[in-house]
Amino acid sequence: MDTSVTPTPSSGAPAPILAVEGLTRRFGGLTAVNRCSFRIEVGRITGIIGPNGAGKTTIFNMVAGALPPSSGRILFDGTDVAGLPTHTMFHRGIVRTFQIPHEFGRLTVLENLMVVPAVQPGERLWRVWTSPARVRRREREVRERAEETLRFLTLWEVRDELAVNLSGGQKKLLELGRAMMTEPRLVLLDEPGAGVNPTLLLKLRDMIRHLNRRLGYTFVIIEHDMDLIASLCEHVIVLAEGSVLTEGPMDAVRRDPRVIDAYLGGGEEGGAPPPPAPLPPLPPPAGRGTRRGSGGGASPDGG
Amino acid sequence: MEQIYGIFLYTVFLLTMGGIYAVLTLGLNIQWGFTGLFNAGVAGFFAIGAYTSAMLTTAASHRHLGGLGLPAGAGMAAAMVASALIAWGVARICIRLRSDYLAIATLGLAEIFRLVLKNENWATNGARGISLIPKPFEHLPEPWNQVAMLLLVFAIVLVLYGLLERAQRAPWGRVMSAIRENEAAARAAGKDVERLRIEAFILGAAVMGLGGALMAHHIKFIDPNMAEPVSATFLVWVMLVIGGSANNRGAILGAVLVWTIWSTTEIITTRLPAEWALKAAYLRIFLVGLALQFILQRYPGGIFRERRLRTVAPPSSQKGGSHP
């Protein structure tokens, strides 16, 4: 592979924890992801942006094991994990969240987190009936961890609520909480900011930053909110039509005419559209509360 | 006096049958209530359990296979194993199907089992069924044999309840309800969803097999008609839904309640003049449907709700009735 992808290390030369090589996924006649190659460095927050249909979530699905690739390699820690099932990926340390919250509706918020940890003797029926003491001991640990996580997420007050009753934003926090219930080596966040109100969004941003800086989590974030990406990610990968268009620091990427092109859906006429408006719609000066995409004309969702 | 004695015997019989249906309903609760597996083939596992135990415990006979004369306890254990094995085979094929497709597949399989039992005369004595199945305690004097059987069924329901209640409150039950609530998220939480679904399906089927065996020993007779979808599958579903899915107490209460309705209406319909009696048989199904409507209007989730872990006791002002 001629992955001449410059690692652009910000400090030293961190090793890639994930290297995607020539990843391709076809759905019938549609090629959603087309020979995509990139690397994710350890300890970093990497952003993946691109217009709708660029293949971002499909890549996540393949890396998380929810979808087998048509071809290509997914090297996690140097070994090819392409096509392994989701639960195996999880045990290797890849955790993902969903764009649309996937809560366990009729479990309480606390239980939603308690489900996650991998080593639970109480998930074996035989152990439940024969060694209840051991099950109970581990259960106490799991519960403490979940309670700690809920405090961090500021969901402590709603811990006994059924998850189905949470607000959209709270469900997003719960998604993040699931990742925190293990020792993840790579966390894939699929649009953590979508449908989250601005105040909560700031909180969410700080949480992600905290997890990265203090606990050393490695994140890959798909996001349409360019502010969130700009403030969190040292490195941004831009996808268009299933392939990597360019990558680099956000400042460089957002000035790249090809990126602007891809978002504005130009292309046929070759040259960049006349007024190269600064690409990402920075937050509307006032009002326009939510960031549901369809806000401004030049919204990334417009493509 | 004679009449009171009759009512007493009838009540014992009613409760025994209710208890046997409670076993079946607890089995379905593992599959549907805990895990969300839409098994519409309860009758199939009921029949496998009933026939297995019948063949192993009856005296030697040229009419059907088996006739080993084993004790009833061994027959019941074998019934559970047989149901579990068949469930394992069925699950290997069907478990990936989504709920409605799983329902159709299991319904179809149960009908296949029933037709095989009906037509393979050499093995099952066909439509004439297997009779003279030994009943536990049948050598005791008259009321006590019935009472002892009731106590046996009662004890089995109690043990099952204890085990399943523990299982449901343990992480095992939690991960099963997580699968029920959101399969993709359960996978993303590292759970081997296929394996766990198969496990719940097998356990539920084993319990249903036990229910079938109990029925065979209690009635002392089994034929393919007893594995009709209406009496075996439909009725068990109604019991679980009325009592409250995902609640073991609900499963038991629903079973006893619905069996009481089902059974006492028979008293009425059999006393009607002959020309009405036939039509009145359908009245029973109608009445059960009516009870279902009535109860679900009042208690949308069944009489008992699913219980979840709470760190603090919910305030007594918790709103009843309406949907959350």
Image (cartoon, rainbow, N blue to C red):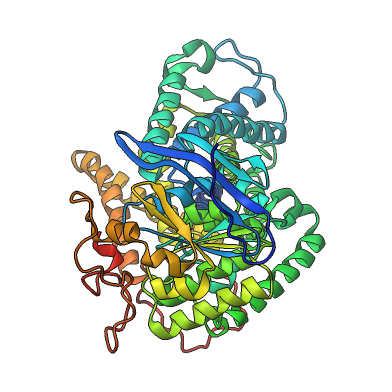
| Residue closer to the observer: B218 or A193 | A193
Q: Is residue B162 above or below residue A28?
A: below
Residue A194 at x, y percent in the picture: 38, 70
Residue B62 visible in the displayed image: yes
Asked whether, in this view, residue A274 is left or right of residue A136, the answer is left
Q: Quadrant of residue B298?
A: bottom left
- Image coordinates of residue A59 in percent, x first then y, are 46, 49
Q: Position of residue A81 (x, y in %)?
A: 60, 41
Q: Is residue A193 left or right of residue B139?
A: left
User: Image quadrant for the C terminus of chain B?
Assistant: bottom left
Which residue is drawn at the image coordinates 38% and 46% (left, top)? A242
Q: Nearer the viewer, residue B176 or A142?
A: A142
Q: Nearer the viewer, residue A244 or A189?
A: A244
* Residue found 29% across the figure and 54% down from its top: B289
Q: Is residue B151 visible?
A: no
Q: Which is more toward the observer, B150 or A181?
A: A181
